[in-house]
Image: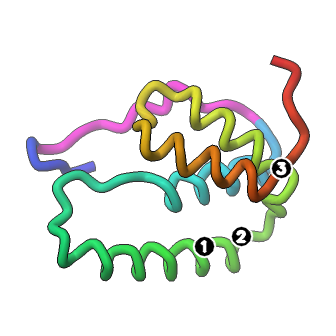
Amino acid sequence: MLTETGPVVIDWSSAAAGPPGADVAIATLIMKVSEVDALPLPVRAVAGLVRSRLVRRFEASASADTGPYLAEAARLRIRDPSVRPAEADRLRRMMEEHPGPVSAD
């Protein structure tokens, strides 16, 4: 990934095996709640529209059902140390909107 300070390697240290719906749910949550650093205010509205369209198209093209996995995927994302407080707040709101089975941990 290219950043302001140069290229960065994305570390997939949290990768795990699981059902396709869980993978799609996590990808969807990342696209919906992730923040973009130093995005100028006038560009934010446009970026929000582009993000919405991207997520809708992604969800429409995914063949896996995310419903059973959204709440658990949000819980996993919240525990990720790279998730920012504002992102965690958005994830909690999504968990309220899409309650699902609670994990045993």
Element type at marker 1?
Answer: helix
Instruction: State the residue at coordinates (59%, 47%).
Output: 91
Tag 3: amino acid = Pro
Q: Which residue is mark 3?
A: 99
Instruction: State the residue at coordinates (68%, 35%).
Output: 75
Give the quarter of the image for residue 5: top left
Q: Determine crowd level at label 1: few under 14, some 14-19, many 20+ residues with C-alpha closer than 10 A.
A: some
User: Magenta region: which residues?
Assistant: 6-17
Q: Quadrant of the C terminus?
A: top right
Q: Which residue is mark 2?
A: 62
Give the quarter of the image for residue 84: top left
Element type at marker 2?
Answer: loop
Instruction: State the residue at coordinates (65%, 33%).
Output: 76
Task: Report, in whole angstroms, how far the alpha carbon at label 3 lies from the one at label 2.
Answer: 21 Å
- Sequence-wise first label, 3 or 1: 1
Tag 2: amino acid = Ala
89, 39: nearer the viewer: 89
| Horizontal arrangement in the rendering, residue 37 relative to residue 80 (left or right) | left
Mark 3 touches mark 1? (CB < 8 Å): no
Q: Which residue is mark 1?
A: 58
Instruction: State the residue at coordinates (58%, 34%).
Output: 78
